[in-house]
Image (cartoon, rainbow, N blue to C red):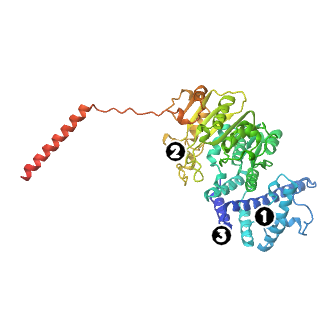
Amino acid sequence: MLTGTIRSQIDQIWNAFWSGGVSNPLSVIEQLTFLLFIKRLDEIHTREEEKAQMLDLPMTRRIFPEGRDEKGEPYDSLRWSRFKNFEAREMMRIVDEHVFPFLRKLGEEGSSYGTHMKDARLGFSNPNLLAKVVEKLDEIDMDDRDTKGDVYEYMLGKIASAGTNGQFRTPRHIINLMVHLMAPTPKDIICDPAAGTCGFLVAAGEYLRDQHPAMLRNKDDREHFHNHMFHGFDFDATMLRIGAMNMTLHGVENADVSYRDSLAEEHGGDAGTYSLILANPPFAGSLDYDATAKDLLKIVKTKKTELLFMALFLRLLRVGGRAAVVVPDGVLFGSSTAHKDIRKMLVEDHKLDAIIKLPSGVFRPYAGVSCAIVVFTKTDSGGTDNVWFYDMTADGFSLDDKRTPLLDEAKLGPLPEQVLTAEDHSKNNLPDILARWNALEAEAANLRTAQSFMVPKSEIIATGSWDLSLNRYKEIAHEEVSHKAPAEIIAELRAIEAEIAEGLDRLEGMLG
């Protein structure tokens, strides 16, 4: 949990960028990512130095070489712990002319932590701004892994609050709900094919640390966690850098965060690789057939990105693999052949587990489109029995562009610190969703008028279009209203008229 002091320090850094002429929030976070990366390199190097000194052995992993760089500057001057003490103009010279070329060289050499730094550039030319930001970043105590991650999450939150590029951020409480629904295990191989800032992968990593702490004490599990478990793809270089840094600061040493246009490239290399997919991909409309991967078109012939992503999830999952993904409502009831084909596949060829309808304001102010979370398991042999439907009406925040919290922080999210009352539930459905998901057998007894209920596979098939829209199956409970007999109502009206006439007669007598 971030303290008020740290929040204030980050706000000061952010304001320094704005007053220094860097006003695009995405540019700010990118420059902060570079600086945090430089700081991180020095921390790794310092740790290796201390280990070598303690063991009285040569350094086995040297980030900054001995000697001087190509321009004659000592590599020692490129370290954060050294240049942070330089005068502003000298610091600017070192960082701009030596540190950033060093980062780009790391990227070209393909080091695990330099891959996304190939085109790193210092994005401003104000020495005083650089000195101020370096000073403020150095003041923030980020020795603790949780603090590092929370600091970066808070910075990423500023992209969304500034109203710029917010499409890259799924609300954190929705991400946490989806991760807890899927309950990742230490053996999972997790993928987000539209990773953005890697929010889903970060949340999955945090879940595993909390629920399976022994995992990191086992050599094989620890190796898997740091090097093989997490895979995120994006085709935006800035997002890749931000996502990679987000994973690093949350304590995942070597996540596979790499460039890929997920819908355009063939997937032969990793088809059937992943055991868990968590995603909220962008649904931008249509692609040309020529620009779409042929292996996806074999699954479903369509130009619509939302259907192509569903085909992609099925392609990437191994048999037995699970997915929780956000889709626009059109996927659930669209009438085209491709829409029906995808739904038929989910219902008849695989195991469709749940449809959780989201309120239309969840992704405001960036999008007002109605969406749903689809949960399924790839089987290639059917397995759908009953599909669980849940009508989420509230997520703890107002459903307008402001997205104001409706409850105290201790009552927000899928696992609130305090127990929710019935009135609280009407403002935050997430804990109820998780509780009902973990006791699905009891849901079979629910009536269709309830907030959640089961629908048998046979009924879905019987629609002829494999309709998965909640409103198709939900029943509205109409309250019985009893009315008086017409004769009784007429008698009451006549009695009222008689009273009015009697009152008028008295009034005339008084006036006469």
Q: Earlier in the sequence, mark 2 or mark 1?
A: 1
**Amino acid type, residue under disc 2 in the picture:** Lys
User: What residue sits 66% from the left and 37% below the top?
Assistant: 338
Distance between mark 2 and mark 1 Cα atoms? 45 Å
Which secondary structure, mark 1?
loop
Dot 3 falls on a residue whose secondary structure is helix
The x, y position of residue 471, in whole percent, is 53, 36
- What residue is disc 2 on? 427
Residue 214 visible in this rendered orientation of the protein = no
User: Around disc 3, counting alpha carbons within 10 Å, would you say few (fewer than 14), some (14 to 19), or many (20 or more)?
Assistant: few
Reading the chain from its start, which is encountered first: label 1 or label 3?
3
Image quarter of residue 3:
bottom right
- Residue 95 lies, in percent from the top left, at 80, 67
Crowding near the residue tagged with mark 2, few <14, some 14–19, many ≥20 C-alpha atoms within 10 Å: many
**Would you name the residue on which mark 3 appears?**
19
- Position of 195 with respect to 52 (left or right) is left
What is the three-letter code of the residue carrying label 3? Ser
- The label nearer to you, 1 versus 3, is 1
Instruction: Indicate the quadrant where residue 321 lies.
Output: top right
Local packing at callout 1 (Cα closer than 10 Å; few below 14, some 14-19, many 20+) is some
> In the rendered image, which residue does mark 1 sit on?
121
